[in-house]
Image (cartoon, coloured by chain):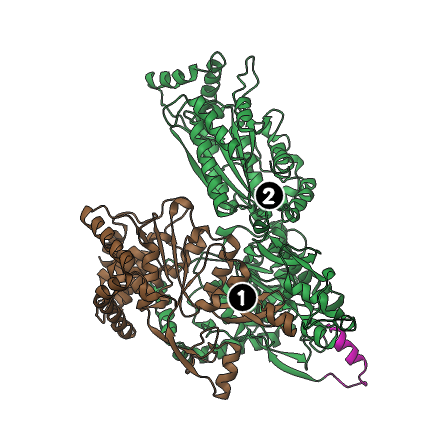
């Protein structure tokens, strides 16, 4: 079948992009020196991210390739098996015949399947001629060109792993369907992403040589120019292209010249030292940043037609290279922050007990100004408790008293977010099991058929037939099967052993809603700090696992969804940070709101695993329907239990004292939930327990 | 298009003027990027979209092409042709057919292979050939892609939909098939916000957004029921009664389409658009573009060849509500008078 990547509508010219200088420079630097390793473009919606990348492809210099080589081998570079066989058969002084052609921009669409990325058995060749040959995949097509992933943060984990493997080796190794093949795959990885949709895994992040943040300019004149040009392009593309053709040619020429100049560019020793210094300052991991920084600085110098790198080149390069690699950031900056957490998990271990959190984990400014207020709140909260421990009913009057005495009713305090921690590696291992296993937890045939088809595996009785994989499995045997008696009329003879099942991957593995008590009593001790820390840790873990986490807080007169189910850690951190504590305890509203959110999710995707985590002491003193608050809460709990699809966990935050009311325990019993006390369960363990007991347990 | 003659006539829909206007704007100018209709159940959302089908213009398509390629000279160096049509065009054997623009349904339960297209089972088994079987995106090219309950769409379907909508090309690299074809469509979605919100990225893909509510006026409500009953009693008769009104709308749309390329947009308005976008704190440039295009299209629908401030104001009301969301779960919508304030500021 002819490939039709060429079917693309007119491309907006690169030089006609308004502003966005940094992006243009980054893309050009990569075009000059492909070893830089690609660009990650982060930015808001509608900031010409994709337009810029597509426009660049039209300007890429031509490359020399071995004639008729499907893997675009370059003479002198690494060769595919065929080309190396051919070249070793050549006489001395002879070279392989070559052609010049434009470098390619290859799209990796989000819906791609594994076989097309790595390449797979050539079906037609196998069936018609019984020949086992590799049909090159996208990695082969993109060799020595750009592999472009739009919305790279939404790419299936499985494909990301394949990309990482190939990108780090520069070689694509195919071992499948009886084919064993390796060919060079040096690609410039260009990805765009909108951070709103969730972050990228740090490992993939580091793979991108450069990173650019984009935002639309606020300047009115610039915006008007954007509008004018876009409208002109839309109404008559060919006319617009004709206007810009000369500038486009100049830019293309500049690229060719810069490529030629690149080997001559030297970096003076002081600047070499300076570049290493910059990397150390930024606390980057490993040495990829150093190398990339130097390459980028040299490419920028080459673009300026200079033979020596200057300080200005280095500065510009540093902005592009270090943006996504800088660590020890002020929070929140989740992706950069994580590797650091990984290195020193012990440090945080004892910290929930102390008031003094490490600086970086806390809200920077309010600390001083808020300290007295916070202490006051704590003092008040423990007052509440003192009274509460005498009688569970008295807390209703307690709030009323407060009002009568003219004290502010809802004394609000904003507690810092407790230390986030990395979930232990052991847990990770287990979690991988969950992820691949989630496809196996068959509930019904239909439910299994949703999700993204990423690869196939052998299954003699498939419920979800992977036709392509089945045919590929059958293909090599066609000749021998034809010799059997009664081969039948079909072109392809399929046997049971050929059947392949689709392996699907769901982005939304688990769906966890936290219902957190943020009423006055939570202010005591470090409860709120710990709770916030636990939620954040789960979020950090969840965003990589494609779980979704939401947060509901109840306080004062009602409950509200603070964090709608999301995988954006950035957003979560900000919302968590600002979560105030204080006021009454409308437990029932919290529960029913949580229930509602989970039902919404179940309607949307009946195969998801909804989990409700209630963090509370079980007290309730605000009713929803006008009944007794506690009785109402029990009813709401029972409704959740009756639903049967929701797994639940109650964390009791009632402080150990002389008298315990055990309200949370009763609630847990009502809900059929697993029950834990916060003393037995420090924040770190909460994550463990949740993963081990709730998420991996069999559905009830 | 089966029994489209019996679809409820567009012009017979009572009230819901903003929704009707937004839909018509998209018919006149497919580059507006579609419309998202938010509202409760039973507010004629789906009826209006289906009724639109009969107002859509006829288009030229390459005969027998599953991708509805546009015959004739192409813009620029690249072609809008699929592989087969490109070959035919080269050989000069590309035949042209005429048909009405389609409204294609994307059901919420659709699987990825149906949406994107997949390996043709029959050809594979019978002939051992690998051919591409086009999916919903191919069908929707140059037409309207209608997603009822768009907020209930599976996440990964949303992803591939966004991919195609952003590029105007559907690139398929799956199940052993490697294929791409043009896929430019007007995305029309309806949703009931009670069932959950849309992801911001998808929201942004809809050019316009309208909020519909049940009509409270008693007389109008009676009229709604009366017309509906008349329609259900005898759709054919009902269609005949409304044929004249329907024709009037259709010719208004046609005139507007002809006028649109000539509609002017003064510099002063350009600045106004940019100012509003900055003041409202929207992401990116898409809002600016949509506001401008919408204002121009409004002028064309009105039969004017120049856009006015009023057009821009109204366009802002349609283009901004769903782009204002800074945080999820924040209510969607514009603050009263926000646009007006920004306009005054820009014009001062």
Q: Quadrant of residue A370?
A: top left
Under circle 2, the secondary element is helix
Left or right of B236: which side holds A572?
right
Give the magenta part as a residue range.
A77-96
Chain under callout 2:
A
As for residue A384 lying within the magenta part, the answer is no
Looking at the image, do the residues carrying marks 2 and 1 touch, with CB atoms under 8 Å apart? no
Under circle 1, the secondary element is strand
Mostly what secondary structure, the magenta segment? loop
Against A591, residue A283 (above or below) is: below
Q: CA distance from mark 2 to mark 1?
A: 34 Å
Left or right of A129: which side holds A540?
left
Residue at position x 54%, y 72% from top? Answer: A57
**Residue A228: % across, % down:** 34, 69
The chain painted green is A
The chain painted brown is B
- Name the quadrant of the N terminus of chain A: bottom right
Say which of marks 2 and 1 sits in front. Answer: 1
**One can see residue A337 in this view:** yes
Q: Nearer the viewer, residue A51 or A128?
A: A128
Against B190, residue B86 (above or below) is: below
**Residue A516: % across, % down:** 49, 31
Q: Nearer the viewer, residue A367 or B72?
A: B72
Residue at position x 24%, y 56% from top? Answer: B230
As for residue A82 lying within the magenta part, the answer is yes
**Residue B131: % across, % down:** 59, 72
Q: Which residue is mark 1?
A: B117
* Residues indicated by labels 2 and 1 sit on the same polypeptide chain: no
């Amino acid at each position: 079948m002819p490939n039709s990547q060429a079917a693309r509508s007119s491309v907006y010219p690169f030089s006609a992009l308004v502003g966005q200088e940094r992006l243009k420079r980054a893309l050009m630097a990569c075009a000059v020196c492909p070893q830089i390793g690609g660009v990650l473009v982060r930015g808001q919606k509608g900031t010409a991210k994709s337009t810029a990348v597509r426009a660049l492809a039209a300007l890429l210099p031509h490359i020399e390739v071995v004639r008729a080589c499907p893997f675009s081998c370059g003479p002198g570079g690494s060769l595919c098996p065929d080309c190396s066989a051919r070249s070793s058969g050549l006489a001395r002084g002879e070279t392989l015949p070559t052609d010049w052609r434009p470098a390619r921009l290859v799209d990796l669409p989000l819906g791609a399947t594994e076989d097309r990325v790595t390449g797979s058995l050539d079906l037609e060749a196998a069936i018609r001629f019984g020949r086992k040959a590799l049909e090159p995949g996208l990695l082969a097509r993109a060799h020595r060109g750009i592999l472009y992933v739009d919305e790279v943060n939404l790419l299936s984990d499985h494909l990301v792993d394949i990309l990482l493997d190939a990108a780090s080796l520069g070689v694509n190794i195919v071992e499948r369907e009886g084919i064993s093949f390796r060919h060079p795959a040096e690609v410039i990885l260009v990805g765009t992403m909108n951070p709103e949709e969730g972050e990228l895994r740090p490992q993939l992040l580091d793979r991108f040589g450069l990173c650019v943040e984009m935002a639309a300019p606020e300047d009115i004149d610039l915006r008007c120019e954007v509008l004018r040009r876009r409208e002109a392009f839309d109404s008559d593309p060919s006319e617009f292209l004709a206007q810009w053709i000369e500038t486009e040619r100049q830019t293309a020429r500049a690229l060719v010249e810069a490529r030629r100049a690149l080997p001559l560019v030297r970096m003076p020793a002081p600047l070499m030292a300076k570049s290493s210094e910059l990397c150390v300052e930024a606390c980057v991991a490993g040495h990829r940043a150093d190398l990339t920084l130097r390459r980028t600085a040299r490419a920028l110098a080459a673009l300026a037609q200079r033979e020596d790198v200057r300080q200005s080149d280095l500065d510009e390069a540093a902005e592009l290279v270090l943006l996504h690699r800088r660590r020890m950031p002020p929070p929140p900056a989740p992706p950069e922050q994580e590797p650091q957490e990984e290195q020193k998990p012990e440090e945080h271990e004892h910290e929930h007990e102390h008031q003094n959190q490490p600086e970086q984990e806390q809200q920077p400014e309010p600390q001083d100004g808020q300290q007295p207020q916070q202490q006051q709140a704590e003092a008040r909260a423990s007052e509440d408790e003192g009274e509460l421990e005498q009688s569970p009913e008295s807390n209703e009057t307690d709030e009323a008293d407060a009002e009568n005495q003219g004290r502010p009713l809802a004394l609000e305090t904003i507690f810092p977010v407790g230390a986030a921690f990395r979930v232990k590696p052991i847990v990770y291992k287990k979690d991988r099991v969950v992820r691949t296993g989630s496809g196996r937890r068959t509930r019904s045939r239909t439910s299994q058929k949703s999700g993204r088809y990423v690869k196939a595996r052998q299954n003699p009785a498939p419920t979800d037939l992977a036709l392509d994989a089945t045919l590929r499995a059958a293909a090599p045997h066609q000749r021998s099967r034809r010799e059997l008696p009664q081969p039948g009329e079909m072109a392809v003879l399929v046997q049971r052993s050929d059947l392949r099942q689709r392996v699907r991957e769901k982005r939304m593995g688990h769906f966890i809603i936290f219902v957190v008590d943020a009423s006055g009593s939570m202010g005591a001790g470090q409860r709120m700090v710990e709770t916030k820390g636990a939620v954040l840790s789960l979020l950090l873990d969840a965003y990589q696992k494609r779980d979704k986490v939401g947060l509901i807080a109840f306080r004062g007169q009602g409950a509200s969804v603070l964090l709608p189910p999301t995988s954006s850690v950035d957003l979560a951190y900000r919302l968590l940070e600002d979560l105030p504590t204080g006021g009454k305890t409308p437990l029932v509203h919290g529960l029913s709101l949580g229930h509602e959110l989970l039902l919404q999710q179940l309607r949307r995707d009946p195969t998801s695993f909804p989990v409700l985590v209630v963090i509370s002491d079980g007290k309730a003193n605000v009713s929803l329907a006008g009944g007794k608050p506690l009785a109402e809460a029990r009813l709401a709990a029972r409704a959740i239990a009756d639903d049967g699809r929701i797994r639940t966990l109650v964390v009791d935050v009632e402080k150990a004292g002389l008298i315990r009311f055990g309200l949370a325990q009763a609630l847990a019993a009502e809900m059929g939930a697993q029950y834990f006390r916060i003393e037995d369960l420090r924040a770190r363990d909460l994550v463990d327990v949740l993963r081990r007991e709730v998420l991996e347990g069999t559905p009830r | 298009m089966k029994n489209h003659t019996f679809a409820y006539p567009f012009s017979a829909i009572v009230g819901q003027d903003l929704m009707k206007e937004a839909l018509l704007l998209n018919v006149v100018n497919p580059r507006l990027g579609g419309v998202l209709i938010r509202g409760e159940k039973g507010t004629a959302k789906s009826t209006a979209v289906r009724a639109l089908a009969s107002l859509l213009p006829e288009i030229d398509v390459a005969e027998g092409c599953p991708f509805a390629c546009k015959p004739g000279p192409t813009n620029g160096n690249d072609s809008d042709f699929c592989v087969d049509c490109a070959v035919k065009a080269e050989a000069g054997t590309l035949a042209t057919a005429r048909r009405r623009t389609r409204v294609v349904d994307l059901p919420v339960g659709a699987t990825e292979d149906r949406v994107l297209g997949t390996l043709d089972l029959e050809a594979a088994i019978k002939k051992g050939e690998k051919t591409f079987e086009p999916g919903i995106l191919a069908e929707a090219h140059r037409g309207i892609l209608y997603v009822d309950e768009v907020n209930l769409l599976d996440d990964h379907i949303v992803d591939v939909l966004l991919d195609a909508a952003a590029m105007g090309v559907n690139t398929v690299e799956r199940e052993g098939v490697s294929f791409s074809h043009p896929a430019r469509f007007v995305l029309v979605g309806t949703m009931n916000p009670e069932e959950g919100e849309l992801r911001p990225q998808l929201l942004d893909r809809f050019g316009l957004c309208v909020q519909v509510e049940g009509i409270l006026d008693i007389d109008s409500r009676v009229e709604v029921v009366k017309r509906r009953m008349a329609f259900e009693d005898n759709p054919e008769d009902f269609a005949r009664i409304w044929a004249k009104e329907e024709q009037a709308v259709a010719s208004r749309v046609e005139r507007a389409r002809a006028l649109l390329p000539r509609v002017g947009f003064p510099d002063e308005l350009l600045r106004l658009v940019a100012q509003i976008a900055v003041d409202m704190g929207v992401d990116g440039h898409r809002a600016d573009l949509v506001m401008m295009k919408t204002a121009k299209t409004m002028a064309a629908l009105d039969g004017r060849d120049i856009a006015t401030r009023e057009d821009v104001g109204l366009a802002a009301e349609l283009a901004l509500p769903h782009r204002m969301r800074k945080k999820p779960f924040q209510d969607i919508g514009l603050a009263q008078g926000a646009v007006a304030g920004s306009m005054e500021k820009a014009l001062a």
